[in-house]
Amino acid sequence: MKMDEISKQYRDFTEDFLKNWFSQFRDEPQKLLYEAMEYSVLGGGKRIRAILALEFCRLCCDDWKKAAPFAAAIEMIHAYSLIHDDLPAMDNDDYRRGKPTNHKVYGEGMAILAGDALLSDAFSCVASADLSAKDIAFAVGVLAGNIGSWGMVGGQVLDIMSEQRELSEQEVLDIQSRKTGALINASCALGVIAGGGSEKQLQAACGFAGLLGLAFQIRDDMLDVIGTQEELGKGVGTDTTKNTFVRLYGLSKCEELVEKYTAMAIDQLKVFKDTGYIVSLAKSLTNRKM
């Protein structure tokens, strides 16, 4: 299968899993909450993080569907983070993936609660995996560590704290390794856990994730400058006053760094076999135009 076909297979599988997960709540009295949750988690997106979880599971055991609850949970958490990022108190964005942001449709209060519920329900999804109690507990710890105060949320806090001053290179790296890199790290690590991978494979997956996340974020910062709202499905130029990699290095240097970190990420994959797809995926993510 070609890369696009494999990605579509993973993406469609994740979409179906998420739809089935939410279908059990349709008759609940708080159905407006579930509607708001589905609006964001089923509102499009490339499912990059879910794909990474499913692919790393395949690299370890071939049966990639074992990682389904983990992949879905990661997408729930990603959706929650975007809902909260778009709020007036945060980035105050009107559009996400070409549609009005969650709070523009459901109001700020419901958007906050939808994000809260997605975060909480993600852990119920993880707990439903057909794995040993030990592996599920390990996965919960990995996921919580990457999205909480040490990881994604901590990175967002550092970002808010830095808005009124220019940062050093290390400070920008500290923010982005948490805001973007931590959830990518969780995706790859959970895939290895679901696939029963070795400690060596887990370390390699995390090494890959850290470097890929860095290249991915640099490209994202570049697209905020050179992309269009039509291409990206969200506002552009919104980060011009933020401490981004483009502000730090300039576009030309950023292009060089994307190539460098992508190559370094791919080099981490030597412990795995049949890496053609994941290598092609990494290159496509860091060379993307949207």
Image (cartoon, grey):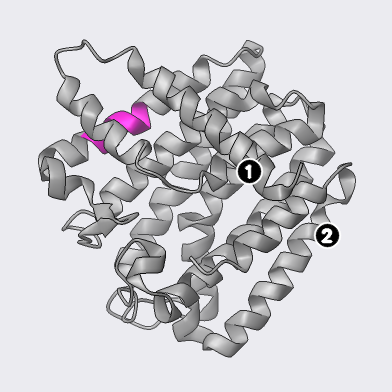
Residue 121 in percent (x, y) is at: 37, 24
Nearest the eye: 260 or 64: 64
Label 2, on which residue?
A: 267
Front-lying residue, 88 or 28: 28
In the rendered structure, find residue 261 and report the number of the disc placed on it: none
In terms of secondary structure, what is the magenta stretch mainly?
helix
The quarter of the image holding the N terminus is top right
Q: Describe residue 199's horizontal placement relative to residue 270 as left or right.
A: left
Image: 143 above or below 239: above
Is residue 188 shown to the viewer in this render?
A: no
Kind of element beneath mark 2: helix
Look at 70% across and 62% down and name the residue there: 283
Question: Bounds of the magenta span?
Answer: 114-120
> Which circle, 2 or 1, is nearer the viewer?
1
Q: Is residue 55 visible?
A: yes
22 sits to left or right of 132: left
Q: Residue at x 44, y 26 (%)?
A: 18
| Amino acid identity at mark 1 | Ser
Q: Position of residue 265 (x, y in %)?
A: 74, 60
Q: How crowded is mark 2: few (under 14 residues within 10 Å), some or many (20 or more)?
A: some
Q: Foreground: 110 or 141?
A: 110
Q: Which residue has dot 1 on it?
A: 7
At 33% across and 73% down in the image, what residue appears? 236
Q: Where is residue 88 in the image (x, y as percent from the top left)?
A: 16, 58
Q: Residue at x 36, y 33 (%)?
A: 119
* Quadrant in which residue 19 is drawn: top left
- Vertical comparison of 173 with 213: above or below: below
Q: Where is residue 273 in the image (x, y as percent from the top left)?
A: 89, 41
Q: Which of marks 2 and 1 is nearer the N terminus?
A: 1
